Amino acid sequence: MADSLTQIQDLINDLANFMCNSIGVLQSVAPPCPINEVTEDLQQEEQSQNFASGIARIAKDIEILADSLPFDDSDSKASTAKKLMELDKERVESLEDLEKVAKMGDEMVKKITSRLIDIAQVQLISRPSC
């Protein structure tokens, strides 16, 4: 199943579609009337009731899902800052360890290079002369 944010996004898309469809249907079937007067025919219209209940249901689903999302408060910000400080300390320690290992690697490369030079010189000396 999708995560809460994806579900909320899907519900908002459904709500937007529902509202657009309801406005379109109401525009095509509703009789003209003055804005300030609402007749009983419009209040009793079944399509209006169906669209209104659908919109209310989707809005309630969105509210329920939004309430289930984790709440971000100042305590979590403080704990996040503390955790970031700890991670930064670990980063510095790891960097120091890495620098030590790199220095050891450089020393080993120097030793190996020196040994290879020694081997090359011995091979040159041990070649029979023509």
Image (tube, rainbow, N blue to C red):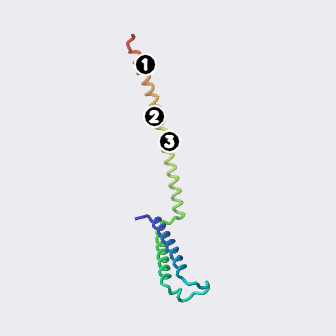
Residue carrying label 3: 96
Which one is in front, 116 or 100? Answer: 116
When the figure is inspected, residue 120 is found, relative to residue 87, above or below; the finding is: above
Q: Quadrant of residue 7?
A: bottom left
Q: Label 1 vs label 2: CA separation?
A: 24 Å
Please tell me which residue is depicted at 46% across the width and 38% down the height of the picture: 101
Left or right relative to 127: residue 12: right
Question: Mark 2: which amino acid?
Answer: Gly
- If the image is split into quadrants, where does the C terminus sit? top left
Question: Mark 1: which amino acid?
Answer: Gln
Which one is in front, 122 or 56? Answer: 56
Residue carrying label 2: 105
**Mark 1 residue element:** helix
Q: Label 1 vs label 3: CA separation?
A: 38 Å
Mark 3 or 2, closer to the camera: 2
**Mark 2 residue element:** helix
Left or right relative to 32: residue 124: left
Across and down, in percent, residue 105 comes to 45, 34
Which one is in front, 93 or 13? Answer: 13
Across and down, in percent, residue 3 comes to 44, 64
Mark 1 or 2, closer to the camera: 1
- The numbered mark, 1 or 3, whose residue comes first in the sequence reads 3
Please tell me which residue is depicted at 39% across the width and 11% down the height of the picture: 129
The single residue placed furthest to the bottom in the displayed view is 40
Question: Mark 3: which amino acid?
Answer: Glu
Q: Label 3 vs label 2: CA separation?
A: 14 Å
Please tell me which residue is depicted at 48% across the width and 82% down the height of the picture: 47
When the figure is inspected, residue 76 is found, relative to residue 100, above or below; the finding is: below
**Mark 3 residue element:** helix
